[in-house]
Amino acid sequence: MLWAGVTLFRAEAGEGVTLREVDGRVRVEINGELFTEYHYQHVSRPFLYPVLGPGGLPLTRNWPMKEVPGEERDHPHHRSLWWAHGDVNGVDFWSESPRAGRTVHEAFLERISGADRAVLHTRNRLEDREGRLIGRVEFKITFHRGDADARWLDWETTVRATEGELKLGDTKEGTMAIRLNETLRLKPNRENAGKATGHILASTGLRDGETWGKRAAWVDYFGPVEGRTMGVAIFDHPANPRHPTWWHVRDYGLFAANPFGIHDFEKKPPGSGDLVIPAHQAVSFRYRFVFHVGDPAEGRVAERFAAYEKDQP
């Protein structure tokens, strides 16, 4: 395994934000408590699972990584928190069908623990079903210590056209995504029928089912988790291509930012959402995930986005 830029944080045990290898995964801890784990070996694509909010409450679905009662078994490619796209030079990196490509871990470029944040930077191969390399993608994930009411992480994806021109195609199947805890769903599953449900709010004021396929600077999905109201907000970085992005946010708990699916979202001609990366060039996308206590007002989501927007270069 190739490691580069590895820096160890020297502190008392249990302090700060730490990264460490555990059974082929990178475990992320805040003050000694599990936040999430980065899975990168023997998987269709790297992903974070589980994702635990303040108080250690689980904010993502367990299946298909783990079998637990009360969860639907749909969409086996919805692995907790991940980046993938359904059309890269015609190859599907979103699903796990027999024809789908794979995002294969190649190297760790940086792994830094720190008092207030930790950074995990990886390089990955985009391979078609025959194993042919069509490009590379880097994930730079910054895990923040957060505060009493929220934890957050920044995920930067850089797609590199290392083997020739790359086209990120026009499809709703993508891209920066999370599959939420089943009790957060806007439309409850069979196990939770008749119980309180989750809700969705966009920065534009649109709510619930109105948010699908619409543009917004941020969206918050919130609802009951183990007797408390919890939420997950995703911020679209102001410098991202096509900001504010479109949202592929579903009533069954899929929650994704997708700047490419214009044909599906706006009923425009096929290909309207294509984005071409010339050979030997790259494009980057940055997002922040905020895992917070309470509804959007209690979680200060608009306030947190304003601070995020102000602090970004």
Image (spheres, rainbow, N blue to C red):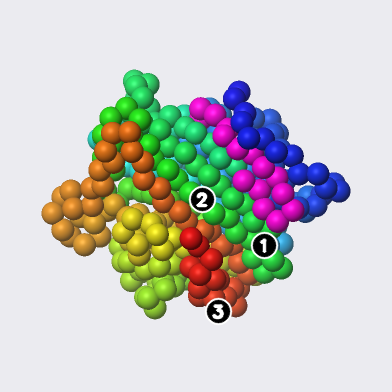
Q: Which residue is mark 3?
A: 297
What residue is shown at x 25% (from left), y 43% (from top)? 276
**Label 1 SS:** loop
Name the N-terminal-most of marks 3 and 2.
2
Q: Nearer the viewer, residue 82 or 276?
A: 276
Q: Amino acid at mark 1?
A: Gly
Mark 2 to mark 1: distance in Å?
15 Å
Residue 286 image position (x, y, % from top left): 45, 54
Q: Which residues are magenta?
A: 105-119
Can residue 284 be seen here? The reply is yes
Mark 3 to mark 2: distance in Å?
24 Å
Residue 198 is inside the magenta segment: no
Q: Nearer the viewer, residue 166 or 253?
A: 166
**Furthest residue toward front:** 313
Residue 101 image position (x, y, % from top left): 36, 31
Q: Amino acid at mark 2?
A: Trp
| Left or right relative to 152: residue 179 | left
Q: Amino acid at mark 3?
A: Ala
* Residue 299: assigned label: none
Q: Nearer the viewer, residue 97 or 171?
A: 171
Q: Is residue 188 above or below residue 103?
A: below
Mark 3 to mark 1: distance in Å?
18 Å
Residue 49 image position (x, y, % from top left): 59, 45
What residue is shown at x 40% (from left), y 33% (from top)? 136
* Residue 155: assigned label: 2
The secondary structure that dominates the magenta segment is strand
Q: Which residue is mark 1?
A: 146
